Amino acid sequence: MQIQELNKEQQKAVNHIDGPMLVLAGAGSGKTKVLTNRIVNLIENGISPYNILAITFTNKAAKEMKDRVVRLIGKEAYNIQISTFHSLGLKILKENYSMLGYEKNFTIIDSDDVLTIIKKILKDKNMSKDRYNPREIKNKISSAKNEMMSIDSFAKVEFDHKVVEVYKEYQQKLKNGNSVDFDDLLILPIKLFRNYPRVLEEYQDRYKYILIDEYQDTNEAQYTFSKLLSAKYRNIFVVGDNDQAIYAFRGANYKNILNFEKDYPEAKTILLEENYRSTKTILNAANSVIKNNHERKDKNLWSNNATGNKIKYKEVANEKEEASFVGTEIKRLLSEGINEEDIAVLYRTNAQSRVIEEEMLKKNIKYRVVGSFYFYNRKEIKDLLCYLRLINNHKDDVSLLRVINTPRRGIGDKTIETLTEEATTRELSLYETISKGKELEFKNLIEDLTKASESLSLTELIDEILEKTGIKKELSTSKLLEDEIRLENLNEFKGVTKSYEEEYGTASLGDFLDEISLVSDMSEHQDSSNRVSLMTVHSVKGLEFDYVFIVGMEEGIFPHYNAINDGSNSAIEEERRLCYVAITRAKKELYITSADTRMLFGNPMRNQPSRFIDEIDKEYIDKERPKKLEKIITKVRKTVDKNATYEVGEHISHTEFGEGIVISVDKSIITVAFPHPIGIRKLMKGHPNITKL
């Protein structure tokens, strides 16, 4: 058996045998190395592998740790329990099912099954899905379980007694069906330990030495479970970093790590502050930001790596210029022999990826969107595009089938089947076949939207579709985080139409759909290795890249407007920890950008650069703020003359389409007849491409 080369502090942690220990491991400080080597050291000191328990947060991390230990000590490692909280909970449940009132063959139901059960209960209780969102109730039940709330406790905080009834019935259905859900895998072992002290003691005697990774991400149930299990021998060794606690929205409580020394007054604490990942400059910048947080344990990362280049901060006029800068820099790096897989672009919200993705496509840079769908591949965007295609072409059966029941209108499979048969027999499109029922209401809706499209700009048409179809209502009344993101993405799509209108000066739906189909064909951009990674800051935790771009560093975006509006210090501190995570992903070079104006969610936003940029000490960052920025922005704003007036019959000249006659005038667009083959075109009023004759 061998212990890998360690620094002084890592060695101290590895050599610790008995009693509680807290290892505050900064980003890139080798915590996995410490955990695996401590397991090896415990065994070398005569502790049986059977008495060692190591807990990680993901199955992938558990497998990696087990593989490392196997490489160090061989087959003996297979006797060590290295697993996630949930797989350990399942093991305990399998060994004690009868004491908890279950039969041996109990079923673990997955997330989809949970939803199915909740939907069935809602139906049985005649509870409208419009008022009671099944996903929302599922999340409430899961949160209540993870916070160790009994049904009675839940009833005190949940004002709607019907939701409490659903929770009660849901639990009963699980019990009757000899089933448990994912949350029960933690809750039931805790119940077992509390009700049967003898059983608890058996597990305490089995797992005398406990190691827990990512302790700052533990929730209430995981914290209680660990505390009960370690209470007898108190040989609990936890590794974590309060500066990387970014999962409060999932119920994680970073205060568990801050309170460790209160729970275990005899605990020893070790700081792993030497970083093996980043340059000195990048680390110093991260330290200068995170020191502004008050609720943290003080530590200062340092490195023996090279000093490295200063962080490059560039303030640009708008999001297009930002994307262009990122694309150009990436092209330069690739020309110097850097691999795509060593480069990442990070953003705070998913909606920001769209402009970056378009730039990658334009510059022919291979990329992948990690932890999310490509912008045009997201369900809500596909739905919206299908509405637009159907308005543009009523005979588009593919688009009609996608949206005829989105949002739900009570048009069933049987109706669609009958329509399809009739359309095939009569050799007509599905749209032409519709003549009655709820499907006729849908057809009338499309007719109304088609008529509206003749006098609206593309951006106005999007608003009309979201409003009239009920998509906006469905997503805005939901309290689900994923639906909030969907609505953000749909609003972001208005940024696509606005940019198109500003660039081309036309509001033609057909031309716009042609343009979009070129950018949204993702067949060339499927996930594979050696691609530039595009991802949110939440998705990047635990990863590292040689070259990192953090885009959209503006007040309202990063920190997010929700945190600013929250008004609490803790919300901003969570954003600052996110920023710290983002900065410490970079190994060699870090770029930060902000835009003076940004089209986001379909609205032009003018944001100040993020407070986090000013928190980086001047000696570690080169700031490029163009003096002409104000002039550029003013010029951009003046390009469209909103006060321009036109009259029917007036002659105009267009830079692309030539001379034409105005045939109708609406709120923000004019319809102009051009000679064959151009024909009728809808144009934006006052666009610089138009000149009156």
Image (spheres, helix red, strand yellow):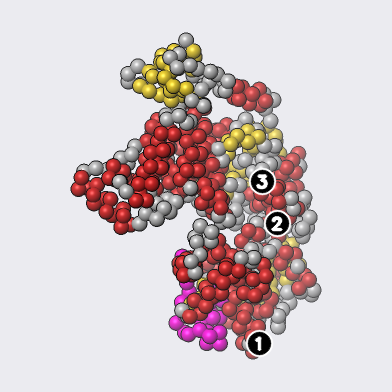
Residue sitting at x 41%, y 53%:
409
Of the pair 553 and 672, the residue shown nearer to us: 672
Residue on which the image places disc 3 = 561
Please state which amino acid type lies under the numbered disc 2. Answer: Asp
Residue on which the image places disc 1 = 197
Q: Is residue 644 magenta?
A: no
Q: Is residue 579 above or below residue 495?
A: below
Residue sitting at x 64%, y 89%:
198
In space, the residues marked 2 and 3 are separated at their CA atoms by: 21 Å
Q: Earlier in the sequence, mark 3 or mark 1?
A: 1
Q: What kind of element bears circle 2?
A: helix
x, y percentage for residue 353? 53, 43
Please state which amino acid type lies under the numbered disc 3. Answer: Tyr
Q: Is residue 312 above or below residue 577?
A: above
Q: Which mark is residue 243?
A: 2
Q: What kind of element bears circle 1?
A: helix
Q: Which residues are magenta?
A: 86-114
Secondary structure mostly taken by the magenta-highlighted segment of the chain: helix
